[in-house]
């Protein structure tokens, strides 16, 4: 069966689901309530942005029936969460969707945009986009909604491997929504956190060197375990909660434990650079 036929078969159901959300959307308001409390339950948008987003999505779907989008509104009718993917992204997933990296922090610092990307790698080792989402907050409910929206978009066919940053919320939601997928943690993100998490240690240089040696020089799991055990002999490292959590999750991120898992060359990954590749030139500071 041709891919276009698969998409056509689901198009009617998708359009039916989407039309349920075509109601009056209310712009963000902060009257009588704290801004932080409101923003935890709605997207941080300027006046008129909500309707502009829906108008754009509607136009895209009229031009291309395979364009997929879903919106989530709160009890006041304000936009809370969004997901969208164009036909190119949906077709790309059918070919290159074995391994997917979910980036949850892109553009937030530079553009103040809480953007979530579903990323992959094609046969030329080029980054490709499988879908995008905007979330009101980093909550289990928001990520569950987003991941289920994406699962609907990809016709209920989850990837074999999912790569995310180390985050308790993401680990909970991935296990719930994608129970058959192997969940790996982004090595680049973990190593990038070392100065922040271990910088206060008296023996920082030695600890950093030992951790790098365990990660990059271990050829066997026994070598990793032995190096890690030596590193944890001091009181500072033994009581460090972050190192404890890393060890508990070691089979999700340490290369020596991932030899048998197909990662499509996406490990380690630097998704923030990928985000800039897709969106620089389209967004301006304080756009949202």
Image: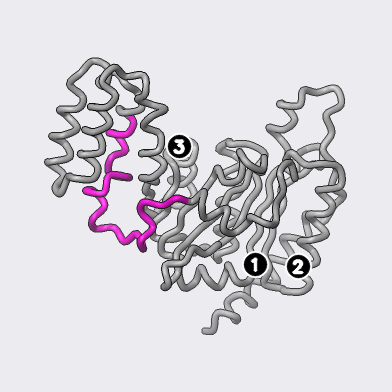
* Left or right side of 228 for 68: right
Q: Position of residue 10 (x, y in %)?
A: 63, 71
| N-term mark: 2 or 3 | 2
Circle 1 crowding by C-alpha within 10 Å: few under 14, some 14–19, many from 20: many
Answer whether labels 3 and 1 touch (C-beta < 8 Å): no
Q: Is residue 257 magenta?
A: yes
Say which residue appears at 55% left-offset and 42% top-offset: 105
Q: At numbered mark 2, what does the secondary structure look like: helix, strand or loop?
A: helix
Say which residue appears at 45% left-offset and 35% top-offset: 168
Circle 3 crowding by C-alpha within 10 Å: few under 14, some 14–19, many from 20: few
Say which residue appears at 39% left-offset and 57% top-offset: 266
Q: CA distance from mark 1 to mark 2?
A: 8 Å
| N-term mark: 1 or 2 | 2
The C terminus: image quadrant: top right
Say which residue appears at 63% left-offset and 51% top-offset: 133
Determine which of the numbered discs, if any, sits on residue 86 in the image. Answer: 1
Pointer 2 residue = 60
Q: Position of residue 159 (x, y in %)?
A: 44, 60
Magenta region: 245-270
Pointer 3 residue = 167
Circle 2 crowding by C-alpha within 10 Å: few under 14, some 14–19, many from 20: some
Q: Position of residue 30 (x, y in %)?
A: 83, 29
Front residue of this view, candidates 169 and 53:
53
Please determine whether, in this image, residue 77 is positioned above or below residue 238.
Answer: below
Front residue of this view, candidates 138 and 47:
47
Q: Residue furthest bottom?
A: 1
Quarter of the figure with residue 20: bottom right
Q: At numbered mark 1, what does the secondary structure look like: helix, strand or loop?
A: loop
Quarter of the figure with residue 155: bottom right
């Amino acid at each position: 069966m041709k891919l276009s036929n698969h998409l056509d078969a689901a198009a009617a159901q998708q359009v039916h689901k989407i039309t349920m959300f075509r109601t009056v959307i209310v712009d963000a308001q902060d009257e009588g309530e704290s801004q932080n409390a409101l923003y935890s339950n709605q997207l941080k948008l300027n006046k008129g942005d909500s309707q502009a987003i829906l108008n754009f999505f509607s136009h895209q779907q009229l031009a291309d029936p395979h364009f997929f989008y879903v919106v989530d509104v709160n009890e006041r009718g304000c936009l809370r969460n969004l997901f969208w993917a164009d036909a190119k992204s949906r077709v790309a997933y059918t070919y290159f969707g074995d391994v997917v990296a979910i980036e949850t922090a892109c553009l937030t610092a530079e553009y103040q945009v809480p953007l979530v990307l579903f990323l992959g790698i094609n046969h030329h080792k080029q980054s490709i986009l499988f879908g995008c989402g905007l979330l009101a907050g980093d909550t289990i409910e928001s990520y569950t909604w987003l991941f289920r929206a994406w699962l609907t978009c990809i016709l209920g066919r989850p990837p074999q491997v999912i790569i995310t940053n180390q985050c308790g919320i993401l680990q909970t939601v991935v296990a719930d929504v994608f129970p058959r997928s192997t969940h790996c943690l982004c090595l680049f993100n973990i190593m990038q956190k070392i100065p922040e998490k271990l910088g206060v240690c008296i023996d920082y240089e030695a600890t950093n060197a030992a951790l790098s040696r365990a990660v990059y020089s271990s050829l066997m799991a026994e070598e990793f375990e032995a190096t890690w055990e030596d590193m944890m002999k001091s009181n500072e490292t033994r009581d460090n909660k972050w190192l404890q959590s890393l060890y508990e999750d070691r089979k999700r991120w340490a290369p020596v434990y991932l030899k048998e898992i197909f990662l499509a060359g996406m490990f380690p990954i630097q998704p923030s650079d990928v985000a800039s590749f897709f969106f620089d030139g389209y967004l301006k500071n304080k756009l949202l």
